[in-house]
C-alpha cells in the first residue's frame, strides 16, 4: 500500500501527515479540522508563501492582538514587506531572492530579526523563521513554497539592547565608558584618512567641595548636567566619555582651541542645584594623537596637560608636548620615585619637627613635618609632591609612615626625661574606615607611648557632614585619649557651630592672621581675629596655638592678647629629630 508525504492542496491547505493512500480521501475533512485546530492555538503567526506568485496561500490568523490590524491585509509577500520597518525591507527582499535561486534537495532554513509596527503604532522586534517547503508533486528540486513562523521577541531584544548599552556606557551620565573610549582611540590611532584626532582630558575644579557642601546627590546631578552640555558642543564623529569620578574625556577631530574654548564656556555657565545657583570651572588637557600611538600614552599626556592647567590657575586648557618631555615626564618620574620610596619605607622620606613653645620659650610639643630628600632633585617640601601622592593614592600609606615614625620620636623624647606631645597632620582620606584607629593603637603599643602624647591635626573639611564616618572615628580617637587640633582655623568655610561637632582640644590660629600682628602699624583685622579666637578658645575650654610667629614683636603682642603657646621661626625652625633630642637634653 503506497504512502504520500507533505504537499499543498489547491485550496492552500497544508498536507503534511503521511498515511496509507486508501485512507486519504476518507480522512481529508477530519485531517483538515484537526490541523486547523492545532494551528489556531499556536502563539506564533504562520504564513505559507508561494515564491512564484508571491501570494500568501495560508495563515493561521494568529490571535496576537498587537498585530491584529495586519491580519486582514497580509495576502501577499508585498503586504508582508509593507508591514516591516523600511530598513528591514531590503533584507527581506535579499532573502527571498536567494531562496528563489536555490536549487537543492536540502534548502537552508533562515532565521532573521525584523521590526513591524503594532496596533499602537510602535515598532516591535520579531523573530522570523523561513523554512523551505518542497512540493512532493514537483519533478524538480526548485523551491516554490516557504513557511514563515513569526514570533514577537520585542521584550527580549530590548533587554539585550539595554545590556549592550550598559556594557559601553556610564550609568550615571550616559556617556561612553572606558571600554568604548579605548575602542574609539584604537580606531583613531589607525585612521589614515588624514584626520587629526585629539584627546581632551577634563577635570572639574574643586568638585569635592560641591559633594561636601551640597551632598553627593547634588554632585551627581551636576555631572549629568555638564555631561549633557559638553556632549552638545562636540562634532558628530566625536566620543564623550566618563573616565572616572569628575574626569571626562573627549576624542575629537575638531580644532583644539575651538573645542576647548567651547568646553570651558559651557561648564562655566551657572547651574541650578537644589534651588541654588552654582558656578564651577574645569581644567582641560589636550594631547594630539599621532598615527599608531598607544592610546594609554595619549591619555596619559592629556592627563598631565590637565594638571599643568590646574597649576597654572585652573579654568583653562593646555596642550601637551611629546610624551617624554617637559612637566609631564617629570611628574611621571616623580610619581614612580615616590611610590617606590613609600612602599619601601625609604629613609629619603624624612621627618623634621618644629617645636611648639610656651612663653618661656620652652618646648612643650612638636609638629611633625615631612620632607623628601629626592636622590637626584635634592630636598623637597610637601607642596612639591603631596598632590602627586594624592593623585597616586599614596596618602594612606604615607600617613601610616608618618604616624609610626612620629611616635617613635616621641618615645625617644620620653627616654630623655622630656615627654612631649607630637602633632601629626591627617587628611580626610585617612579617616572613616577604622584603619587609622587600628594603626594608632598598634603604634602606641609598639613604642610604649601614651595616647596623650599624640595630637592629630585636621582641617575644617572634616566638619561638613555631622554624621560622617570621618567625624565618628575622630570621636573614638579622642575617647582613646588623643589630642585633636583644628588646624588653619579661620581660613575655611565651616561655621562656628561646627566646633560643637568636632572633638577638638586645641585650636591653631593660622599664620595668615599672625602676619599682620607685631608690625609698627598692626593690621586691625588680624588683631581682632586673634583676640576673638583667644576668647572663644577660653570660653570653650580649648588651648590655642599661634602659628607662624616670626618675630619678637609678634610674640609680645600675642602674649598681651592672652596666647600661651607659639610655633614659628621666632622660637625654632623645623629640625631633624636628632637635633631636637639634643635640644631637649641640653635644656
Image (cartoon, helix red, strand yellow):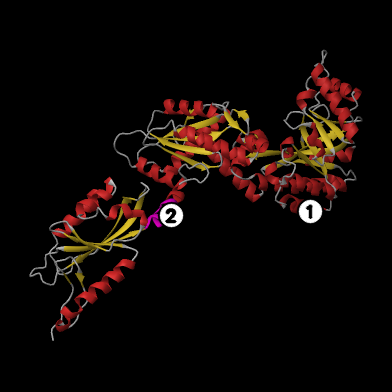
**At numbered mark 1, what does the secondary structure look like: helix, strand or loop?**
helix
- Closer to us: mark 2 or mark 1? 2
Residue 326 in view in this figure? no
Q: Residue 507 shows which numbered tag?
A: none
The answer to whether residue 314 is magenta is no
* Viewer-proximal residue among 21 and 100: 21
Q: Residue 441: which disc? A: 1
| Main secondary structure type of the part rendered in magenta | helix
- Please indicate whether residue 269 sits to the left or right of residue 50 in the image: right
Q: From which residue to which does the magenta span run?
A: 153-163
Q: For residue 113, what is the image quadrant?
A: bottom left
**Camera-nearest residue between 392 and 419:** 392
**The N terminus, quarter of image:** bottom left
- Marks counted in the figure total 2
Mark 2, Cα crowd under 10 Å, few <14 / some 14-19 / many 20+, is few
State the residue position of label 2.
159
Decide which of tag 2 and tag 1 comes sooner along the chain: 2
Residue 390 picture location, percent across and down: 62, 41
Q: At which x and y percent is residue 462?
A: 73, 39
- Magenta stretch encompasses residue 156: yes
Residue at 17%, 76% in the rendered image: 5
Amino acid at each position: 500500500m503506497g504512502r504520500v508525504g507533505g504537499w499543498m492542496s489547491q485550496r492552500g491547505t497544508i498536507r503534511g501527515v503521511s498515511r496509507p493512500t486508501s485512507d486519504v480521501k476518507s480522512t481529508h475533512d477530519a485531517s483538515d479540522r484537526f490541523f486547523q485546530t492545532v494551528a489556531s492555538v499556536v502563539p506564533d503567526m504562520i504564513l505559507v508563501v508561494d515564491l512564484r506568485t508571491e501570494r500568501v496561500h495560508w495563515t493561521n490568523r494568529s490571535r496576537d492582538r498587537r498585530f491584529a490590524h495586519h491580519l486582514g491585509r497580509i495576502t501577499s509577500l508585498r503586504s508582508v514587506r509593507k508591514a516591516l520597518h523600511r530598513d528591514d525591507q531590503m533584507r527581506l527582499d535579499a532573502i527571498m531572492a536567494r531562496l528563489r535561486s536555490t536549487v537543492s534537495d536540502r534548502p537552508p532554513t533562515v532565521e532573521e530579526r525584523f521590526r513591524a509596527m503594532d496596533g499602537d503604532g510602535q515598532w516591535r522586534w520579531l523573530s522570523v523563521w523561513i523554512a523551505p517547503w518542497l512540493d512532493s508533486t514537483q519533478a524538480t528540486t526548485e523551491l516554490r513554497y516557504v513557511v514563515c513562523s513569526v514570533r514577537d521577541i520585542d521584550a527580549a531584544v530590548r533587554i539585550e539592547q539595554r545590556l549592550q548599552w550598559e556594557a559601553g556606557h556610564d550609568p550615571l551620565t550616559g556617556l561612553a565608558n572606558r571600554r568604548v573610549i579605548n575602542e574609539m582611540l584604537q580606531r583613531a590611532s589607525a585612521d589614515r584618512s588624514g584626520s587629526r584626532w585629539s584627546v581632551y582630558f577634563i577635570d572639574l575644579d574643586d568638585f569635592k567641595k560641591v559633594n561636601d557642601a551640597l551632598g553627593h546627590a547634588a554632585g551627581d546631578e551636576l555631572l549629568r548636567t555638564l555631561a549633557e552640555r559638553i556632549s552638545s558642543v562636540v562634532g558628530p564623529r566625536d566620543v564623550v566619555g566618563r573616565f572616572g569620578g569628575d574626569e571626562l574625556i573627549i576624542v575629537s577631530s575638531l580644532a583644539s582651541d575651538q573645542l576647548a574654548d567651547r568646553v570651558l564656556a559651557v561648564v562655566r555657565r551657572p547651574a541650578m542645584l537644589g534651588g541654588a545657583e552654582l558656578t564651577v570651572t574645569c581644567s582641560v588637557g589636550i594631547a594630539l594623537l599621532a598615527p599608531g600611538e598607544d592610546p594609554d600614552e595619549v591619555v596619559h599626556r592629556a592627563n598631565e596637560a590637565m594638571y599643568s592647567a590646574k597649576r597654572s590657575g585652573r579654568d583653562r586648557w593646555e596642550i601637551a608636548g611629546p610624551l617624554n618631555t617637559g612637566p609631564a615626564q617629570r611628574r611621571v618620574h616623580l610619581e614612580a620615585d615616590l611610590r617606590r620610596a613609600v612602599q619601601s619605607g625609604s629613609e629619603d622620606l624624612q621627618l623634621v619637627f618644629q617645636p611648639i613653645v610656651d612663653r618661656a620659650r620652652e618646648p612643650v610639643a612638636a609638629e611633625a613635618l615631612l620632607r623628601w630628600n629626592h636622590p637626584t632633585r635634592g630636598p623637597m617640601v610637601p607642596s612639591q609632591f603631596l598632590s602627586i601622592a594624592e593623585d597616586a593614592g599614596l596618602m594612606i600609606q604615607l600617613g601610616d609612615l608618618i604616624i609610626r615614625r612620629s611616635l617613635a620620636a616621641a618615645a625617644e623624647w620620653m627616654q630623655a626625661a622630656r615627654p612631649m606631645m607630637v602633632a601629626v597632620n591627617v587628611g580626610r582620606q585617612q579617616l572613616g574606615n577604622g584603619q587609622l584607629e587600628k594603626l594608632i593603637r598598634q603604634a602606641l603599643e609598639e613604642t610604649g607611648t601614651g595616647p596623650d602624647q599624640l595630637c592629630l591635626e585636621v582641617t575644617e573639611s572634616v566638619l561638613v557632614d555631622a554624621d560622617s564616618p570621618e567625624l565618628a572615628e575622630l570621636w573614638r580617637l579622642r575617647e582613646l585619649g588623643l589630642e585633636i587640633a583644628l588646624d588653619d582655623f579661620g581660613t575655611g568655610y565651616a561655621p562656628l557651630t561646627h566646633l560643637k561637632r568636632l572633638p577638638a582640644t586645641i585650636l591653631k590660629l593660622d599664620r595668615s592672621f599672625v602676619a599682620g600682628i607685631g608690625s609698627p602699624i598692626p593690621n586691625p583685622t588680624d588683631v581682632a581675629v586673634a583676640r576673638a579666637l583667644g576668647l572663644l578658645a577660653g570660653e570653650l575650654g580649648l588651648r590655642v596655638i599661634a602659628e607662624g610667629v616670626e618675630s619678637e614683636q609678634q610674640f609680645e603682642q600675642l602674649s598681651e592678647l592672652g596666647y600661651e603657646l607659639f610655633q614659628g621661626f621666632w622660637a625654632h625652625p623645623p629640625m631633624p629629630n636628632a637635633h631636637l633630642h639634643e635640644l631637649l637634653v641640653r635644656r
